Amino acid sequence: MPPATIPYVLAEVLRETPDTLTYRIRPEAGGEVLDYKPGQFVQLHLTPGSEAKLSRSYSIASSPTTRDFIDLTIKLQGTFPQHLKDLKPGHVFGLRGPLGHFFFDPATQPHIVLLGAGVGVTPLVGMLRYATALKLPNRITFLDANKTEEDTIYREELLGLHARSNPAAKIVLTYTRLAPEHPWKGERGRIDWDMIERHVPGPLDKHYFICGPDQMNKDLKDLLLVKGVPRERVKLENMGF
């Protein structure tokens, strides 16, 4: 039996990058948000009664430890986001979920490697926020690829809160389109095996979560399998971009 569609009201809109917004939503009836696991997604309907064509699935960026709101971070490209870009607080959506098997299980995954790009980092950040909030001992290596610094969603949070207050987390940002003279001293280029080996000790026995553009997902999955990472330790989330 699929979960019911529940009315959620738009509480706040937060700008993350020039073309990416976070929609913070709360149950219209009040009380706590739905129960979900870090990394799962929901189906967002433009209104509680709208048809499937006026809906799209989005990963939850907030942590399950936050019980009074859910954050959905959305890149304003494609058809459905055009319906969202001018919405104001007070708008009522329909929300169905939680959905999906792409989630972090602290009991069975002592060291996770998060490989993301662009807005694909949303479920990965949800996992990181969960681990930081609960002060979990699980090690997390987060490799986040973007074109430029301005394109990096949650950049200040990643390099600030999590880098400072979560000793089990390692945050690695890499950029693909910085000018050669740019002063950035960190990683450059797309995520590849050499980069993974530089930051992940004993990479073959870790649990991997990959979320980004379709081709990146496929390329990284194939790479990990060729290198010898067991298939059951590699999970992908398709963001449809």
Image (cartoon, grey):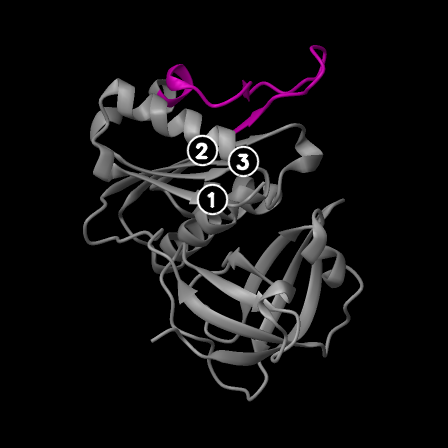
In the rendered structure, which amino acid carries the disc numbered 2? Answer: Asn
Above or below 117: residue 72:
below
Instruction: Indicate the position of residue 22 as horizontal and vertical percent values.
Output: 64, 58
Callout 3–callout 2 Cβ contact below 8 Å: yes
Q: Which residues are magenta?
A: 171-196
Q: Does the magenta run of residues contain 189?
A: yes
Above or below 106: residue 195:
above
Could you say whether the residue bearing mark 1 is in a helix, strand or loop?
strand
Per the rendering, the mark at residue 213 is: 3
Could you say whether the residue bearing mark 3 is in a helix, strand or loop?
loop
Instruction: Indicate the position of residue 173 as horizontal and vertical percent values.
Output: 53, 30
Q: What residue lies at 65% left-to-right and 27% top-to-bottom?
A: 147
Q: Local crowd at mark 1 within 10 Å, few (<14), some, or many (≥20)?
A: some
Q: What residue lies at 60% left-to-right and 41% top-to-bottom?
A: 155
Instruction: Indicate the position of residue 233 as horizontal and vertical percent values.
Output: 24, 38
Q: CA distance from mark 2 to mark 1?
A: 8 Å
Quadrant location of residue 184? top right
Q: Residue furthest bottom?
A: 29
Q: What residue lies at 59% left-to-right and 84% top-to-bottom?
A: 28
| Left or right relative to 14: residue 59 | left
Upstream in the sequence, badge 3 or badge 1?
3
For mark 2, what is the residue? 217
Q: Residue furthest top?
A: 180
Callout 2–callout 1 Cβ contact below 8 Å: yes
Could you say whether the residue bearing mark 2 is in a helix, strand or loop?
helix
